[in-house]
């Protein structure tokens, strides 16, 4: 049920233009009816087809086929006209979507006294303790494990703060909508809303991850229950909240009039002055300070070198890939970077997480496809195309957007991303993504919403996260040529997890595209006094790699990327991350990532006893850097050769 096409929806009987319910006896002598969806955001066309067989087994709906057709229809209308329908929608065909999709698992709920034809609902996840009796009984009956690992509200909050999966939610589509709050159900049935929620997404294993806006607040919503549609027996993990009630609860949460959770204690003494962040100057140092501020606020710990490295790479690279052990905080770091730029998913959807799936094998899985049969463009459920369309609109061109391809190497990147990689290498005014043939422009029903081509502007930053293990694919040279692959540090959590005390921010620093791009240095020659020495170093590394195999080497694209990175370092040296450190990191991230292969090719350039090797070149250019990270990487590759006879 974690596919967006397996979505639980709320609706009512639809009425025709004469005000009559759309209920009739079809050619198979079965009652057929049409429902109007009342869900926000809208689902499909908004209309669905149901049959008597669509109801759940425990829903009592009788149909006496011995009666006249009119009487059968009348009986059904009498039973259903004052009911809300809770139903599931599943698309059975990848390349075909019926106009009025068939539904299943239909249940009735009574209309509330405040319900009107204009009432629409948001679906909001509901969570409870792992040992909650009613939820456990539902799990057993439906044979559907929710994988809850917390026993009370405090533990649930810690799961959110620590970015751990909060389990599965039945019938909920994290790709369609991100609520600003979720609901917690106590053992006694008391319900509370918990927010600020900024983003949520499913992992490949179906677990839901929830991101919050630094501080979490809760408010009692029991007083709203007479208008909220919720049944533990039908689905204890999802409730439908009328839009007016949803906004009222959201106002309490976002207005900070509710109860704030306080879990994180500062390690600094009360006598120490809190760290003030001056956000009156827009510079690199401000972004890095804000990254540290938001990471500390969420009880996450990173090296300041990582912040400098990641920010500089994102600023001047078409694609930045964060690599590391599972659980090192790669996805959380993307969220922190977005916050530092003032990007908040809850407000206008400028931050998008795209969970990559192992089944992806072409760009249609990422972009969508043109449905010739119905003359409509069908974007993928990832929301990727929608964000690109939004970013190119005139009113959004001075706003920043971030797209994160989460676990992007679960599928082969060359299969679903190669077209996009090529586009990003073109000059800015030529970066056009074509969705379909131009001749279909104005012929498709939704061509106004999805044009035949999309301009990829410089207001979008693309980031990927990867885990390197037996379930993932390694990168090809085509990807490595175009991306900064950053291995995040794992801090010594026995010593280096130190909580800092920051003073509160007066307001959120919301960066515009122009402000952000003003930080980018493009004149490398005038800003790098030792540029020629760097190029001599890179040329010697290139010749060394070519001597091992013609497939190795350092192309002009990589040279320019390294120069751009070094030129774009913050003016202030932060945590020792100076020019020498930057050069060291760049050779690891842009060059040594490509040194892969068997011992008979690489042994001569990796081993210390070779006449020509990396170590000799590093020693020759020791005035440029101590190459500490490079030497560690070479040592690791030597171990791989000794152990496997191959560099991974």
Image (cartoon, rainbow, N blue to C red):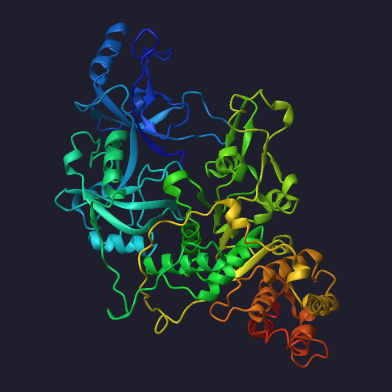
Quarter-of-image position of residue 446: top right
The answer, for residue 470, to whether it is visible in the render is: no
Q: Which residue is drawn at 25% across and 26% down?
A: 115
Count of picture labels: 0
Q: Residue at x 34, y 77 (%)?
A: 273
Relative depth, front residue between 52 and 173: 173
Residue furthest to the front in view is 280
The front one of 427 and 372 is 427
Residue 190 visible here? yes
Farthest bottom residue in view: 609
| Residue 379 x/y as whole percent | 57, 37
Q: Quadrant of the N terminus?
A: top left
User: Could you say where residue 9 lies in the image, as x and y percent from the top left?
Assistant: 36, 34
In the figure, is residue 520 to the left or right of 495?
A: right
Which residue is farthest left? Answer: 188
Q: State left or right for residue 11 relative to residue 434.
A: left
Q: Percent from the top left, x then y, of residue 360?
A: 60, 49
């Amino acid at each position: 049920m974690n596919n967006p096409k397996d979505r639980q929806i709320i609706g009512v009987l639809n009425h025709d233009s004469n005000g009559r319910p759309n209920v009739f006896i079809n050619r198979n002598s079965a009652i057929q009816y049409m429902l109007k969806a009342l869900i926000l955001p809208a689902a499909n066309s908004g209309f669905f087809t149901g049959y008597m067989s669509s109801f759940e087994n425990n829903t009592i709906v009788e149909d006496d086929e011995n009666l006249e057709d009119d009487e059968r229809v009348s009986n059904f209308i009498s039973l259903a006209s004052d009911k809300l329908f809770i139903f599931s929608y599943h698309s059975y065909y990848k390349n075909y979507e019926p106009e009025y999709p068939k539904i299943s698992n239909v249940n009735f709920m009574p209309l509330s006294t405040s319900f009107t034809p204009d009432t629409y609902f948001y679906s909001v996840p509901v969570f409870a303790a792992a040992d909650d009796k009613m939820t456990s009984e539902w799990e057993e009956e439906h044979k559907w494990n929710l994988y809850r690992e917390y026993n009370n509200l405090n533990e649930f909050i810690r799961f959110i703060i620590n970015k751990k999966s909060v389990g599965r939610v039945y019938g909920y589509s994290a790709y369609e909508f991100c609520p600003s709050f979720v609901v917690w159900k106590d053992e006694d049935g008391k319900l509370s809303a918990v927010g600020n929620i900024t983003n949520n997404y499913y992992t490949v294993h179906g677990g839901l991850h929830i991101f919050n806006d630094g501080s979490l607040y809760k408010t009692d919503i029991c007083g709203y229950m007479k208008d909220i549609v919720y049944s533990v027996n039908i689905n204890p993990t999802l409730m439908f909240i009328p839009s007016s009630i949803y906004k009222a609860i959201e106002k309490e949460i976002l207005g900070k009039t509710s109860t704030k959770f306080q879990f994180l204690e500062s390690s600094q003494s009360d006598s120490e002055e809190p760290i003030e962040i001056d956000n009156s100057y827009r510079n690199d140092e401000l972004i890095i300070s804000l990254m540290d501020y938001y990471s500390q606020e969420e009880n996450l710990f990173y090296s300041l070198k990582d912040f400098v490295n990641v920010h500089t790479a994102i600023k001047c690279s078409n694609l930045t890939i964060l690599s590391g052990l599972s659980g090192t905080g790669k996805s959380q770091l993307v969220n922190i970077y977005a916050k530092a730029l003032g990007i908040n998913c809850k407000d206008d959807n400028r931050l998008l997480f795209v969970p990559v799936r192992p089944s992806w094998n072409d760009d249609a899985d990422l972009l969508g496809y043109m449905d010739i049969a119905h003359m409509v463009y069908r974007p993928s459920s990832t929301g990727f195309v929608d964000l690109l369309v939004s970013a190119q609109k005139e009113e959004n061109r001075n706003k920043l957007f971030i797209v994160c391809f989460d676990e992007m190497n679960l599928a082969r990147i060359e299969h679903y991303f190669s077209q996009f990689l090529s586009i990003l290498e073109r000059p800015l005014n030529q970066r056009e993504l074509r969705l379909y043939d131009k001749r279909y422009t104005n012929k498709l029903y939704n061509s106004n919403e999805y044009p035949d081509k999309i301009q990829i502007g410089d207001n979008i930053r693309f980031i990927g996260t990867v885990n390197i293990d037996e379930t993932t694919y390694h990168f090809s040279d085509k990807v490595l040529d175009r991306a900064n692959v950053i291995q995040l540090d794992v801090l010594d959590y026995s010593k280096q997890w130190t909580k800092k005390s920051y003073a509160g921010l007066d307001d959120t620093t919301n960066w515009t595209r122009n402000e952000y791009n003003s930080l980018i240095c493009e004149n490398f020659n005038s800003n790098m006094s030792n540029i020629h020495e760097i190029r001599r170093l890179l040329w010697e590394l290139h010749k060394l790699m070519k001597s091992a195999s013609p497939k190795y080497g350092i192309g002009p694209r990589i040279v320019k990327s390294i120069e751009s990175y070094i030129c774009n370092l913050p003016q202030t040296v932060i945590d020792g991350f100076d020019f020498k450190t930057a050069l060291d990191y760049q050779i690891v991230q842009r060059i040594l990532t490509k040194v892969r292969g068997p011992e008979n090719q690489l042994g001569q350039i990796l081993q210390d006893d070779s006449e020509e090797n990396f170590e000799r070149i590093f020693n020759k250019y020791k005035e440029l850097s101590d190459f500490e990270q490079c030497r560690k990487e070479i040592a690791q590759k030597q171990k791989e050769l000794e152990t496997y006879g191959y560099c991974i």
